[in-house]
Image (cartoon, grey):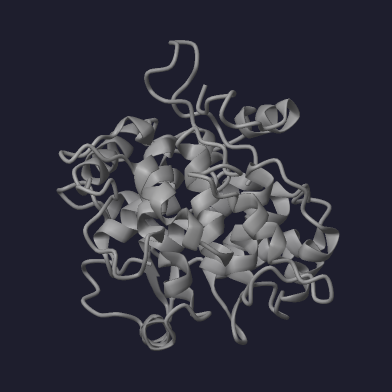
């Protein structure tokens, strides 16, 4: 089992949903690429139990790496640094300070580690998410990306999601069918919100908001098979979009998502992998965290419940999903919108800019 049922009290019905086989791309998982990426992440284990050297944007990068490893079939709970620390110890030490979208990431990391997100070193991360709810607005977070993360974490933890929370997400949908920051739709936010709505019970065929989001993704796919900013694809945005398609039980390698010369979102992602197993991006270590779950055929929510590769032979390490910004090396520059978002992130600390929210 991917989690310890004694430590994590997920209702049986929800657990069944998270592990239930579903339609997905025939080519996924891309096991070789995923294994190489997982080896890269494992090699970044820090003395304090964190993963990846650059923690300038906070502990969220370690949390992302934790469920990337879980999606790859690797049990992150088994990692022990030379100093004797583990990712679970890293999470427990920081849990009291987590709030908002970062608390959502922490809760997801706890589930991936086999811990109860309501009792992480004495901290109830689910209560932190629930207490952030503002009944008057339905908001848990100031932006829709953070709101979607919180919805996904609540569902994964088996907690109730208020109807007003989902209404607030739908209210943020822009006229073109996407979600983003300000008045600009982005593939990352659109894909994550779609996954949140699907995870909370919205069917892709019967929720107009989800249907419009999927239509936006289809209309905004680029000629190289990926998604990105200012007409330039990047690995993170593409990985988010792939996860949204999988959450909606759509095949990212079907004819609808195949571009000229036969390129698809999956072939685009595979083309971004570097020799060390990471992926080309603003930060290759950051990009690998998002790409691995997508290439493993896992959505954002069920990445954290992936059975480990050491499971029984009849338990696949890469179960098919049920629910639900790296720059290409050859481009040589960062798209203008991405630069603006990064600048805003650095200027506003924990503000609502896209890149900081994702790296928090």
75 lies above or below 155: above
Q: Position of residue 197 (x, y in %)?
A: 72, 56
Q: Residue at x 57, y 43 (%)?
A: 117
Q: Position of residue 279 (x, y in %)?
A: 27, 55
Q: Is residue 161 left or right of residue 140?
A: right
189 lies above or below 120: below
Q: Residue at x 39, y 51 (%)?
A: 93
Q: Is residue 182 left or right of residue 283?
A: right
The single residue placed furthest to the front in the displayed view is: 122
Q: Position of residue 120 (x, y in %)?
A: 51, 44
The residue nearer to you, when weighing 202 against 56, is 56
Q: Is residue 146 left or right of residue 175?
A: left
**On-image quarter of the C terminus:** bottom left
The single residue placed furthest to the top in the displayed view is: 313
Q: Which of the 4 image quadrants contains residue 80?
A: top left
Count of numbered circles in the view:
0
Q: Residue at x 68, y 68 (%)?
A: 140
Q: Is residue 130 visible?
A: yes
Q: Which of the 4 image quadrants contains residue 139?
A: bottom right
Q: Position of residue 298 (x, y in %)?
A: 51, 41
The residue nearer to you, when weighing 262 against 327, is 327
The residue nearer to you, when weighing 269 against 55, is 55
Q: Residue at x 57, y 37 (%)?
A: 116
Q: Is residue 262 visible?
A: no
């Amino acid at each position: 089992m991917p989690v310890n049922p004694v430590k994590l009290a997920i209702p049986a019905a929800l657990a069944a949903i998270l592990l239930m086989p579903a339609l997905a791309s025939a080519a996924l998982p891309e096991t070789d690429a995923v294994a190489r990426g997982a080896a890269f992440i494992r090699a970044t284990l820090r003395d304090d139990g964190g993963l990846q050297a650059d923690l300038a944007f906070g502990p969220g990068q370690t949390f992302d790496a934790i469920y990337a490893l879980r999606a790859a079939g690797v049990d992150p709970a088994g990692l022990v640094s030379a100093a004797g620390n583990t990712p679970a110890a890293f999470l427990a030490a920081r849990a009291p300070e987590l709030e908002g979208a970062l608390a959502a990431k922490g809760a997801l990391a706890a589930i991936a580690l086999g811990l109860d997100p309501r009792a992480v070193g004495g901290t109830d991360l689910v209560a932190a998410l629930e207490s952030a709810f503002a009944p008057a607005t339905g908001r848990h977070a100031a932006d829709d990306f953070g709101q979607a993360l919180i919805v996904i974490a609540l569902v994964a933890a088996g907690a109730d999601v208020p109807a007003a929370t989902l209404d607030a997400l739908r209210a943020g949908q822009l006229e073109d069918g996407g979600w983003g920051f300000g008045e600009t739709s982005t593939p990352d936010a659109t894909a994550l919100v779609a996954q949140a709505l699907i995870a909370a019970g919205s069917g892709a065929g019967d929720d107009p908001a989800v249907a419009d989001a999927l239509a936006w993704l289809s209309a905004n796919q680029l000629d190289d098979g990926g998604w990105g900013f200012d007409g330039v694809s990047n690995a993170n945005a593409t990985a988010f979009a792939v996860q949204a398609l999988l959450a909606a039980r759509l095949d990212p390698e079907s004819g609808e998502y195949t571009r000229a010369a036969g390129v698809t979102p999956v072939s685009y992602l595979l083309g971004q992998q570097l020799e060390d197993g990471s992926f080309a991006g603003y930060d290759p270590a950051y990009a690998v965290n998002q790409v691995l779950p997508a290439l493993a055929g896992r959505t954002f929510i069920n990445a954290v419940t992936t059975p480990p590769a050491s499971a029984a032979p009849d338990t696949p390490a890469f179960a098919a999903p049920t629910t639900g910004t790296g720059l290409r090396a050859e481009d040589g520059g960062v798209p203008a919108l991405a630069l603006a978002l990064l600048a805003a992130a650095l200027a506003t600390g924990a503000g609502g800019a896209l890149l900081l929210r994702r790296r928090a």
